Amino acid sequence: MLDVYLAREVEGLSYQYIGQSQVRSDGIEKVTGRAGYVYNMEIPNMVHAKVVRSLVPHGRVKSIDVSKATKLPGVLLVFTRDDVDAGIYPFFGPVVNDQAVVAIDKVRYVGDIVAAVVAEDPRIAEEAADLVEVEYEELPAVFDAEEAVRPDAPLVHEKLNLPPWGFSDVRATLHPIDGTNIVNHFRVRRGNVEQGFAEADYIFQDTYRLPAVQHCPLEPHATIARYESDGSITVWSNTQTPFLVQAQVAQTLGIPQSRVRITVPFLGGGFGAKTYPKLEPLVAVLALKTGRPVKLSLTREEEFITITRHAATVTIKTGVKRDGTITARQTKILWNTGAYADIGPRLSKNGGYASVGPYRIPNVWVDSYCVYTNMPPAGALRGYGVPQVSLAYETQMDRIARELGFDPVEYRLKLALDEGDSFATGDIIHSAGFRELLRRAAQAIDWKDKSYKQLRGSTVRGKGIACTIKSTITPSTSSAEVKMFEDGSISLLTSTVEMGQGSDTALAQIAAEALSIPVESIRVQHPDTFVTPYDLTTSSSRSIYHMGNAILLAAEDAKRQLRDRAAEIMRVSPESLEVRDGRIVSKTDHRYGIPFGEAVKGVGPSHGSIIGHGLFSTVGGLDPETGQGKASEFWFAACGAAEVEVDTETGKVRVTKYYASSDAGKAINPVACEQQNEGSAINGLGHTLFEQMLFDNGQPINNTFLDYKIPSFLDLPHDLVTEVVETPHRNGPFGAKGMGETAISPVAPAIANAIADAVGVWVTELPVTPERVLQALQEQNLKHDGAGEGNQ
Amino acid sequence: MKSFEVVFPERIDEAVLALKDAGAEGKAIAGGTALLVLMKNKLYSPKHLVSLGKIDDLKRLAYTPGIGLTIGSGVTEHELEAAPFVRDKFPVIAQAAHAIGNIRIRNVATIGGNLAHADYQCDPPAALIAMGAEVKLYGPDGERTVALEDFFLGPYETVLRQGEIITQILVPDPPQGATGRYFRFTSGSAADRPCVSVAICLTFEQGVCSWVRVALGAVAPTPIRVKEIETLLEGKVADNGLIDEAARIASVSCEPLSDTRGTDWYKREMVRVLVQRGLQSLINGAGCLSC
């Protein structure tokens, strides 16, 4: 079936709806302020929750006194561990059930939830939350992953509560180490690294450190839950994973999944922060206990400590021959996953194998450790571990090239993985145009022109390039339904979450192409677990490929039913009919046919509707000891090129030009793809130059937008250029793979390499603050002076 | 945020009376952009707020040739940055007002609130000090006038007494032919608060400076005026050597607090660079202004 669509392009027939830039279907709704978000939503009879948070980073909860809070007029409930009865399963978490709706025995970070207050008014709830008195027995705390892996480090979790279910890819490779803070030790063992290093002429070893950063979605986390009269529960949540939340809420309350309805309107941004259960289990319990619809929405300050991007320490050792061939690579990564694992165990796996980079390397040894600490939990953020490891392998790649006297672009072109090459996991590379991306990036930045360093005054200019590889969640499943009404209009039912990435528009384009009807005649239904079919998650840049394929299957199913009904009306065989421009027509004479609506009605009383169903599922998995197997259904390839100006007197780095590109396989909505590249570039720019979450003994000190700055328009490069490369994927819908988060990973190393090009200073720690650069420049001057004296 | 009561007097004396009655639990509020952040985070929870927002007498902004600029404390930062006579005659002040936050903030934040808040990372104070501003205060004991450089006592601390409010900021006309500029360096986003700021105003003819004012922001518990530089440069030909010496003096006269925007060492370095570049650009029309 899929070949049918690819064949169309081979035959030179152009597509009608995909591959053409389409105005966002949700654009007008959003810019006129009419689009609905959970954060703004109100439900009749609704009451408000506020949580009480731990003020200590690690401690045993000795006692909780709720008497003052309970007495405040307007307070309905103060919920603590004492209210967790047999009917409630308080623990949750996507891999380890290590988080509780309220603290049961210990608190594990500043901000951990100890109790929840429900009141008629949000201000009363807040006031009551302040009146809850909690007594802690403080315990030694550990904040840094490098310290948390030491044998004498305090244990954040004494034992792991692993549920009997779980994601097959994570469970198969999960390797916690008992009696330590290591919740997962993921390994890749390929070839013989010792022999590889022995064969090398040079060994390069570097360590890179990245701090925790924040997702900063415009809309903070928000959830409303209401118990219905039939014993079911409705949850409105701004989640990226409605079905995982459904399963979790069913488990928490001990009720069947068929009685848990998760509905998801537009999200005001996700960036990974809204994957997996967050507030929903607690709010569901509060709705159960009060019998009222309960809303909990976080403040910006709370948003900062709810989920973060993993701080990481990446050590990378590479053996290189004189001709540049890499003989072996060994990496060791410590991921600071904070107090709760969230999706850290999978991220440490994916980030682990990704740390090898998109190059031909025969001998590989990876140790990737996911480590508990007394910090806010870390989870998925655009790039999913790859931005951390790509800073390491791409900056070191430039160091190797420069020290061996190779041009960094030529050197990468020589070693980059090509179609049919084998990646570190044994996956065979297909549809990842690294070479094409590199060549175009070099051209975009005018790489050959070396006159760029001549600037006046204290400012020096440099150029840098970087190239990255990323996997998608494998195995996984998406399903879709195409529902046709008797007037021929169509509803597309999927559980893909529209969080600003443009899925409503792109998925409608795919359905329009498959059904041969205009995009405008398709309405996309947002996720509702009582209505829309199953989808694993809206993340991992997976929706275009997985949901796109499910939609193609659903469309085929609907078209088959249409043809059957039309054949009955037209008294011909279904095989003699085809779908064309909103009609069922004779294959031999397109003038002879009936519109969709007529076919839906069928013969006799109207049949009312047609529902086409499609389910698309992938397979894969890695060997737990060697990390070999199938890691990913497909591979994302991206390239970034930066031109920077470094002020040598202040250390300030200004990115004057940035080029971001990614391989989409096929761009369904080209303008949206370009915008995703732009978003990735800007997002990465902040992470590279100034974003970092700062703590003092676990206490957040910059969890406001006054002190934590994301890029403003004034920070953007004068030239921000993006490009989408198309190397078709043989199994993708129209050859498409998706690309949403692809272009973020090259940003930091491209800028780091440009800084090295300009002033010879190698970045090993993010963010690249002017103070760090100035310090490095002064140390460099001291060394040079020292070397000068030595020669005399 | 904790519960509080708020009143909206329409006259200055009513506001002062309300503040006096509220005592230690009371606080004046204007635009609220600073105070509400503290209140929402429960760092400060006054029980009685006296809004100055409805007092028209505080909202006047006027320029009288030969006398100078009179800025009502309720004038917003945007009114200040946008007024043609401020931009024309007092560009240093307009530049500093423009540097604050974003347009949404500047449309509600007032200059009086900014000064009374006394956050060492605010933009306007250094610019106003360099321009020789005075503040008129009114309280239960009547009116008094204080030089702005003597107004700040420390972070979030000023000479304002219980029940006293700022009513006006007075900025005298600078000498004929004066030129000046507000220089600002951010160590993070361009929209961040300053790591270091420098306001310089001077007059010079044929390379000789006859009048010099230099004030530093964000590099001490309060904004500071560096008189030593003024003495050094006034009446002399400001050559490169003298400018470098002025920059060195600036870097040793400040007492920066190490914070998320830079360490003590780095801020001193940046003060030196900014003063050096600032003087070069004003005197020789050279140097990098795009810090």
Image (cartoon, coloured by chain):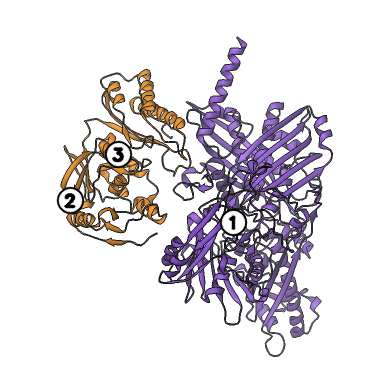
Label number found at residue B153: 3
Quadrant (top left, top right, bottom left, bottom right) of the C terminus of chain A: top right
- Helix, strand, or loop for circle 2? loop
Chain under numbered label 2: B
Same chain assignment for discs 2 and 1:
no
Which chain, by letter, is purple?
A: A
Quadrant (top left, top right, bottom left, bottom right) of the N terminus of chain A: bottom right
In x, y percent, where is residue B91? 30, 38
Residue mark closest to the camera, 2 vs 1: 1
Say few, some or many: other residues with alpha carbon within 10 Å of mark 2 (under 14 / 14 to 19 / 20 or more): some
**Tags 3 and 1 touching, CB below 8 Å:** no
Residue ranking furthest to the top: A792
Chain under numbered label 1: A
Q: Earlier in the sequence, mark 3 or mark 2?
A: 2
- Helix, strand, or loop for circle 1? strand
Residue beneath disc 1: A106
* Res. B92 in view: no
